[in-house]
Image: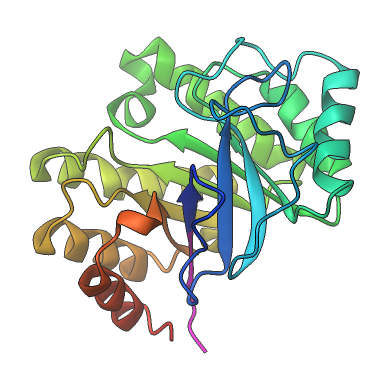
Amino acid sequence: MSNYILGGWSQYLNEPAPASFSYAIYGMVTDLTNLKTGGLWSPATTPPPASHGSVMWAYGGAYCSPDAQPASQSAIDAIDAATRNLGWSGVDFDDECNMNTGNIALAMQKLAGLQTSYTFLAGWSYNNPQASPEGQVINSAVAEIAKSGACQRFCLMCYADAMWNMSDIVANVGPAIARTIAIVGDPKKVILALTPAGLNAENLAYFLDQVKNNNIGGLFVWEYSTLSAEDLNTIQTALNIA
């Protein structure tokens, strides 16, 4: 049995995850007031699609709005109801719009018994909080959610619209993993995330080495349906996942 897990995100409900994935996350629910995606479906009214792995939905993502959500107990209750009522496995909180991390922690506690994860951009700002107000906010958010004890996975987005160049990868991926382990405590709660856009043999090998050398939880893939069969096989072989 492998020491690692695979998972990832899709924006399309008709795209099941590969059979080797433990988690499939659908979204992105970027209208945080109404819990709707850009495609105007909501986990509150749309049941989880058939897929391999536990099927979660993503609260947040690029261009999510408004800021500082969830803003109230009623918003927390709505997240919980949307998850439980139709049988979703849990929620990934993808913090790309300055969320209310105290209330995210409360929402995760309310979701007890289900899956929870916190996804954030783990780049230069995160690794250099002494020089970046944004980095200070991210570090504080990770620490606050970790302290709650309610978050099962912390997913490090170490990419932009495409994979970073190798110098940025080398400068930031390892330090981001080490920083998160130091905050969270348990390496297995730390997940490295990549995108198939701009993925090549060199940067994929580096990411896989970082997963194994740091013995973290595993690897998640943005838009996994665009991952080539060859790269999926490389990942599965490196992490000993059938």
Q: Position of residue 175 (x, y in %)?
A: 31, 44
The quarter of the rendered structure image containing the C terminus is bottom left
Q: Is residue 79 above or below residue 65?
A: below
- Queried whether the magenta region covers residue 4, the answer comes back as yes
- The magenta stretch is 1-7
Q: Position of residue 153 (x, y in %)?
A: 59, 52
Q: Is residue 19 above or below residue 156?
A: below
Nearer-the-camera pick, 219 or 196: 196
Asked where in the image residue 145 lies, by quadrant, the reply is: top right
Q: Position of residue 44 (x, y in %)?
A: 80, 36
- Queried whether the magenta region covers residue 227, the answer comes back as no
Task: Report whether 95 appears left or right of 115.
Answer: left
Residue positioned 77% across, 24% down in the render: 103
Q: Is residue 67 above or below residue 106?
A: above
Asked if residue 185 shows in the view, the reply is no
Residue positioned 84% across, 49% down in the render: 86
Residue positioned 54% across, 19% down in the render: 64
Nearer-the-camera pick, 9 or 99: 9
Residue positioned 56% across, 58% down in the render: 24
